[in-house]
Image (cartoon, grey):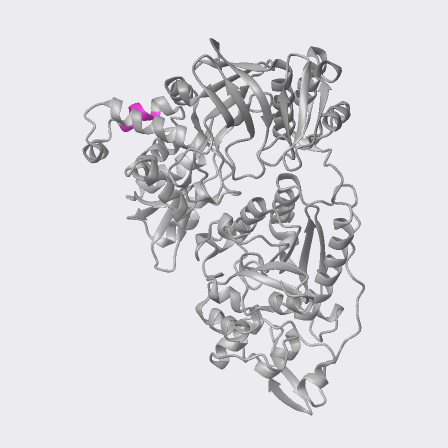
Amino acid sequence: MSKNEKFTFIDLFAGIGGFHIALHNLGGKCVFSSEMDIHARKTYEHNFKNISPELFENKMFNDDIRNITPSDIPDFDVLCAGFPCQPFSQAGHKRGFEDNHNSERGNLFFNISEIIQEKKPKAFFLENVRGLVNHDNGNTFKVIRKILENELGYSFYYKVVKASDYGLPQLRPRVFMIGFRDEGFMKSFTFPPNKPLKYNMSDVWEGECSREIGFTMRVGGRGSKIDDRRNWDAYLVNGKIKQLGVKEGKKLQGFPDNYEFPVSKTQAIKQLGNSVAIDAVQEVAKQLLIHLNFLNKDQNQMKETKNKGEWTELLVFVKLLSDQSFNLSDKNLNKKSATFKIKKVSTHNLENDLFIIDKSTIKIENKESGDFKNVKINDILNTEILDNFKNAIIEGKKTFTIPAFKDIQERLEITNAKGGNSNQKADIVLDVENNSISKENEGFGIKSYLGSKPTLLNASGNTNFIFEVKGVSCDKIDRINEIDTKTKLKDRLDYIEKLGGKLIYKGAEKETMEYNLKISDSLMPEIIGEVLLSFYKKRISKITEIIDEIEKTQDLNKKISYGDRNSLEIKIKKLLVDILLGFFAGTKWKGEWESNGTLIMKKDGDLVGFHIIDLPSLKEYLFENIKLDTPSTTRHRFGKIYKEKNNKLYFKLNLQLRF
């Protein structure tokens, strides 16, 4: 970044760039933008190709946000999004999350949450109509807040502000939502105080206007009479009625005089009506940045609050130092006689390697300088300490602290046992040996049964699969989606069939997932389509039983040409291992395993492991223990019939694999 660029941001549902202008004025650099409307895209590029040329040179101006893989977005500090307001607007149908009549626009908030979950920005700034706060008796807003606070771990502030609160002569009440990643207990953000008007409507019109503050500029209804209660663009100026034009719209929304519209006047007015009030965004964003700088001063403190998974990784780390070995496991997690002796424990992101010298001594060595010191392991760890640590994890709720472990972390000079980031399969790195092999820096994943059963493949937009619905008319969308029984997905699919409809598999929603499945096996996407239908239509969850069901599908049998159940089982077993050791749904896979084993923390705190030297046991463990699970349909945007702009109907199913 240049000296004038102080932070980075992304601009989602960008429209014509109101957020972009506001944050650029504050010294921000836009590294990614997304806007679907072709006319708004034309205006956006026309005005920002010189301000932010890298967006277009690096192909970071995306169209449909549903098509982006979050991991492909460059790192950034602040996420900005004025996500579609029509589902929550008084002027629209107010379907909210249920709006599936126009490319799932009611569900697009969840694309935002997936990007936040993957990229973990320092802060977010969201904007929507004030109707969002009370939509569906406040339930829609509660869902949004719960996801941002409880699931993603961000603070959450909101306020309904008017454009006139921050200098622009327009009502335009909008809810602004602000949140910070690492605020902890220091929740002290406040919205900036109101500012006086920069100019009034007479200044906008350059004549005597009957109103000081204008109506909310919006889309549609243009040309209504001045005495119509729905009027928004007719004003009495110098005793004459005038209709709002592009020049006046720019002033109302805070766009600079040199902002240009390479589109028709009708499109320009529509684009302005869909935009944000720039001055209001800029004043609140300025306050956001001040608070962010305040928080950054406290970022060097060790994070003491962790979830069960993070604490378990630390438990595995210190238990390996104490035990100095682990047994390989059979498919039922019973110990085999084969063991691995451990010589070193580390992670990809840890500054130090911890070498086991003998039963009582550990050498802590800095990876860069080579400086080291020896510590006595018995002075730090024993069976009672490890049991207490395990019990604290079992009893913990959400994120929590374990004060007694702080001394252990400090003496061993470890702050995090995890592999470095969410896109690494190796949570821990070991030097191991037994009678037949000796391996240095061998990566192992970690799975734990101390909390809820672990997942093999977490649900996200990356694990959605699309089916085209044929034989059903568009007027049945609401009727199908209104089915809200305990088995609503099965019942919706059954009703589609009852109407004469049929689901035709189209592929993974994200190209990356489709690519990864084909790397595992060229027919795997189609196999997964059958797996999902067996689960959601017939409620068969165990992967072993699903394979039995798929075997009956003659069309698929012909494609696979396996002749018996065994070939399909081989393909599924390979896929399960590939997911465990090789690929993430949202990252293109090279076909290689990034980890060569997995450590399992059992309910009783015992530790066993799998390694590729005994691949059959690992395959059997996965095959016998993996089942499909149903994640949140709202959170992950699936399970409803929806219409695309090609007037075709589609239905998405999500793949989540759990032990």
Is residue 193 at all visible to an observer of this figure?
Answer: yes
Above or below: residue 285 compared with residue 352: below
Quarter-wise, where is residue 529 in the image? top left
Seen from the viewer's position, the closer of residues 67 and 182 is: 182
Residue located farthest toward the front when viewing the structure as drawn: 370
Residue lying furthest top = 337
- Quadrant in the picture for residue 143: top right
Relative side of 62 to 523, left or right: right
Query: What stretch of residues is rendered in magenta?
Result: 546-550
Can the viewer see residue 509 in this picture? no
Most common SS among magenta residues: helix
Which of these two is toward me, 75 or 104? 75
Where is residue 556 drawn, in percent x and y? Answer: 23, 34
Q: Report whether 651 appears left or right of 423.
A: left
The residue under the point 41% across, 23% down is 612
Identity of the residue drawn at 56% across and 64% down: 91
What quarter of the picture does the N terminus occupy? bottom right
| Number of numbered labels in the structure image | 0
- Residue 597 in magenta? no
Q: Is residue 385 above or below residue 144?
A: above
Q: Position of residue 254 (x, y in %)?
A: 66, 75
Return the x and y of residue 37 as percentages of the image width and height. Answer: 46, 66
User: Does 368 sit above or below residue 357?
Assistant: below
Give the residue drawn at x 18%, y 25%. 563
- Where is residue 513 shown, x and y percent of the image? 40, 43
Q: Quadrant of residue 580?
A: top left
Q: In the visual, does 346 lie left or right of 548?
A: right
Q: Is residue 549 magenta?
A: yes
| Residue situated in front as seen by the camera: 248 or 460 | 460
